[in-house]
Image: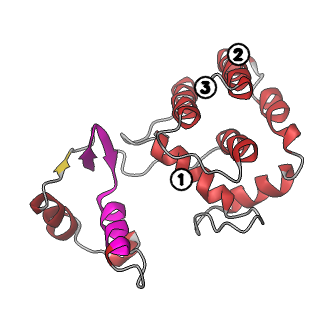
Amino acid sequence: MLLHEGKLYDSKAIAGAAIGFQYPDAGPLSAKDFSGGEATVKARLERLGFAFQELDGDFTQNPDWTREETILALDILARRRPTLPDQNDREVIALSDLLRLYATQRNVKGNANFRNPNGVSMKIANLSRLDNDGRKGLPNGSKSEARIWAEFMPDVARLFPVLHVHLSSKSHLALTNNLTLCHDRFRAGDV
């Protein structure tokens, strides 16, 4: 993983975006447009001065987002649109922390960038593609995002109560309490 300012990034994504900036008419490249990561992308980025960090563990791909995680991301989008918060947004960072806590309580493991602020902001951008407000959002997303969007939009007031009820099992009581506190802070503008 590419290491920049203490955060880990997919090197192919960075290289693809850089090419898109350099050649805007051609647009960015996707990961499938590259081959031989170690020999090509990583080597070129190292020559440009970027550092890399090996991941601990055997995880090469993070698990899919759960319904609950997606609903929390949709809640941020619904309240903040048409603005898309980025990875430096306090609310995105707080949700990232919360999702990591949720994963720990469920014994879910991922790689070093599991539900990091960049991933949370990208999930929000993926969801924004479904909005008919004239913005494009990110072009890729999952079928589950579309299903959740159809279920809750435009009645966004239903988002948190549904999540709260779903997570109220005894095994998730501590998480539910944390979600309630965080959600109340989000709504009050404290985050």
Q: Where is residue 82 drawn, in percent x and y?
A: 70, 54
- Cα distance between the residues tagged 1 and 2: 26 Å
Write down the region rendered in magenta.
Answer: 1-21
Q: Residue at x 76, y 22 (%)?
A: 169
Q: Are marks 2 and 3 in contact (CB under 8 Å)?
A: no
Q: Position of residue 77 (x, y in %)?
A: 69, 47
**Three-letter amino acid code at the position of disc 2:** Asn
Dot 2: few (<14), some (14–19), or many (≥20) neighbours within 10 Å? some
The residue where tag 3 is placed is 191
Image disc number at residue 177: 2
Local secondary structure at mark 3: loop
Residue at mark 1: 122
Q: Earlier in the sequence, mark 1 or mark 2?
A: 1
Q: Is residue 179 visible?
A: yes
Residue at x 73%, y 23% (from the top left corner): 188
Residue nearer the viewer, 133 or 140: 133
**Mark nearer the N terminus (3 vs 1):** 1
Q: Disc 3 residue type?
A: Val
How far across and down, in percent of the image, does residue 141 sit?
Answer: 61, 63
**Disc 1 residue type (three-letter):** Met
Element marked by disc 1? helix
Q: CA distance from mark 2 to mark 3?
A: 17 Å
The mark lying in front, picked from 1 and 2, is: 1
Q: Residue 10 lies in magenta, yes or no? A: yes
